[in-house]
Image (cartoon, rainbow, N blue to C red):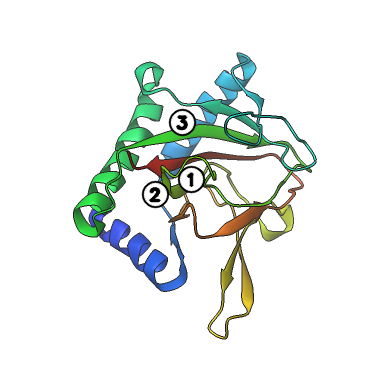
């Protein structure tokens, strides 16, 4: 049985070796189910809003991204949400201790992509704000299959310098992590609703 720190080491190895880390089982099936129920309730309560693009002047552009989001606030987090935030904080502490990243805090939101929506290729760090250091995405989808689509596609230089496109399925409990200013990525359309907890670990 791997400890949490063993899992973090695998994540770091992936980032160092290939530019991104994938950690399956970051959340257990029960934790995924609990967070999914909370997401559904918050959505029913009207807490979600169409996601925008930009930093200082945010605009909704459905031709670029079609997800709806709900920001997590630690002060108002429910127990299952706080458990997730605490686990992310453990990752922050480990990265700071072993990689000296100087991470200070995070900004996390639920993301809900209705069937057929997408997010075109982009980079997570704003030109006017360099605080975002690591992007972290944890999926809440159950029984996801290749035919469902909705892949996260990350773009990186291959061994010969040519660009590679790596497709990752949004499997429930899976955590994907990469440096926010390094990898361009996109979300492909899915044939069913696609949900996750998405965010960024930030420096001062």
Tell me, yes or no, whether the two marked residues, 3 and 1, touch with CB atoms within 8 Å: no
| Left or right: 96 as drawn, with respect to 65 | left
Residue at horizontal 61 percent and vertical 56 percent from the top: 185
The quarter of the image holding the N terminus is: bottom left
Tell me, yes or no, whether the two marked residues, 1 and 2, touch with CB atoms within 8 Å: yes
Q: Secondary structure at mark 1?
A: strand
Tell me, yes or no, whether the two marked residues, 3 and 2, touch with CB atoms within 8 Å: no
Q: Is residue 75 above or below residue 94?
A: above
User: Which mark is first along the chain, 2 or 1?
Assistant: 2
Q: Residue furthest top?
A: 45
**Tag on residue 138?**
1
Residue that carries the numbered disc 3 in the rendered image? 34
Q: Secondary structure at mark 2?
A: loop
Residue that carries the numbered disc 2 in the rendered image? 26
Residue at horizontal 56 percent and vertical 19 percent from the top: 42
Quick one: label 2, few (<14), some, or many (20+) residues within 10 Å? many
Q: Nearer the viewer, residue 38 or 202?
A: 202
Can residue 3 be seen here?
Answer: no
User: Which mark is first along the chain, 2 or 3?
Assistant: 2
Q: CA distance from mark 3 to mark 2?
A: 14 Å
């Amino acid at each position: 049985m791997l400890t949490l720190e063993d899992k973090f080491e695998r994540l770091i190895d992936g980032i160092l070796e290939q530019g991104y880390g994938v950690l399956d089982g970051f959340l257990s099936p029960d934790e995924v189910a609990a967070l999914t129920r909370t997401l559904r309730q918050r959505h029913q309560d009207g807490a979600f809003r169409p996601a925008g693009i930009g930093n200082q002047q945010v605009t909704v552009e459905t031709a670029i991204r079609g997800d709806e989001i709900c920001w997590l606030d630690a002060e108002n987090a429910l127990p299952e949400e706080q458990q997730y935030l605490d686990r992310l904080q453990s990752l922050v502490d480990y990265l700071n201790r072993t990689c000296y990243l100087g991470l200070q805090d995070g900004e996390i939101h639920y993301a809900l992509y209705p069937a057929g929506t997408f997010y075109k290729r982009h980079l997570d760090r704003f030109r006017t704000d360099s605080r975002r250091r690591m992007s972290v995405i944890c999926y809440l989808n159950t029984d996801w299959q290749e035919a469902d689509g909705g892949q996260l596609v990350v773009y990186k230089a291959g061994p010969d310098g040519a660009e590679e496109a790596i497709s990752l399925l949004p499997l429930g409990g899976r955590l994907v992590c990469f440096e926010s200013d390094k990898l361009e990525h996109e979300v492909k359309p899915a044939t069913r609703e696609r949900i996750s907890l998405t965010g960024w670990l930030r420096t001062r």
